[in-house]
Amino acid sequence: MRKKTGFTLIEMIIVMGMTVLIMGIALSVFMTGNKVFSESDIKTTLQMEAKDIQENISEICMNSSKIILCEIDSDNVTEEPYNGEIMSNKFISISGEETRDKKWLQVSKLSLESLTKNSGVNSYNNITNLENVNISYDENTKILKIGSKKTVVDVKHFYVQPLNLNDNNNKISTSKGLKFNIILEKNKSGKTIEYTIDFTVTFRNI
């Protein structure tokens, strides 16, 4: 009489152990891959948002002739000289720069005098139909508002640097443009992902 062929108990244990091991490896690979794809998606989203921010701010600045209001911590510093007592406490350094190189301002509000589609020149050779366009940042809520059309959340910081900074007797109202340093951030599964925007815009000469 033939003996029935089949798995022994030991063989069954080995097979089950290998199955569990393979499933564990597969799950680990899947989780790692899913995490990588998720982070990649967030970085892509931040990159697209950054491009939109730069385009919106650049458009406003290139249609503007000057800064008519600059507020830092609710203080109006528009006409304050860079080497004055008030401004000496407003300039800061950003990550990656020496602490002594304080060249940046974390502004809460900028108001720029800008052209509109109805702007023109009157008989006195003056530009007419100008408007004030605001760019504001709330450090507590991390919200950046660009004009009346664009609102951005998850903005870690919003810094500007006047282009006339080398002249200590100067002030931001006479600057012909600004450098911007903006960091966007999102938190995903306990990990913070950041994207930095750096660009310079010169105002319109009108």
Image: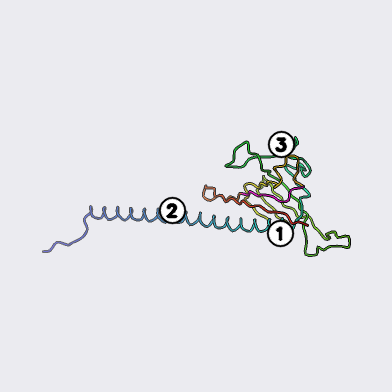
Classified by dominant secondary structure, the portion drawn in magenta counts as strand
Task: Identify residue for label 3.
Answer: 88
Q: How many marks?
A: 3
Name which residue type carries label 1.
Answer: Lys
Give percent across and percent down for residue 165.
70, 43
Quarter location, residue 170: top right
Q: Nearer the viewer, residue 167 or 54?
A: 167
Question: Which mark sits nearer the N-terminus, 3 or 1?
Answer: 3
Q: Which residue is mark 1?
A: 149
Could you tell me which secondary element the residue under label 2 belongs to?
helix
> Is residue 179 one of those drawn in magenta?
yes
Residue receiving disc 2: 32
The residues bearing labels 3 and 1 have C-alpha atoms spaced at a distance of 34 Å
Nearest the eye: 29 or 117? 117
Q: Which residues are magenta?
A: 174-182
Residue 72 falls within the magenta-colored stretch: no
Left of 107 or right of it: where is 6? Answer: left
Badge 3, how many Cα within 10 Å: few under 14, some, many 20+?
A: few
Q: Position of residue 142 (x, y in %)?
A: 65, 48
Callout 3 amino acid: Ser
| Quarter the C terminus occupies | bottom right
The mark that comes first in sequence, 1 or 2, is 2
Q: Nearer the viewer, residue 162 or 36?
A: 162
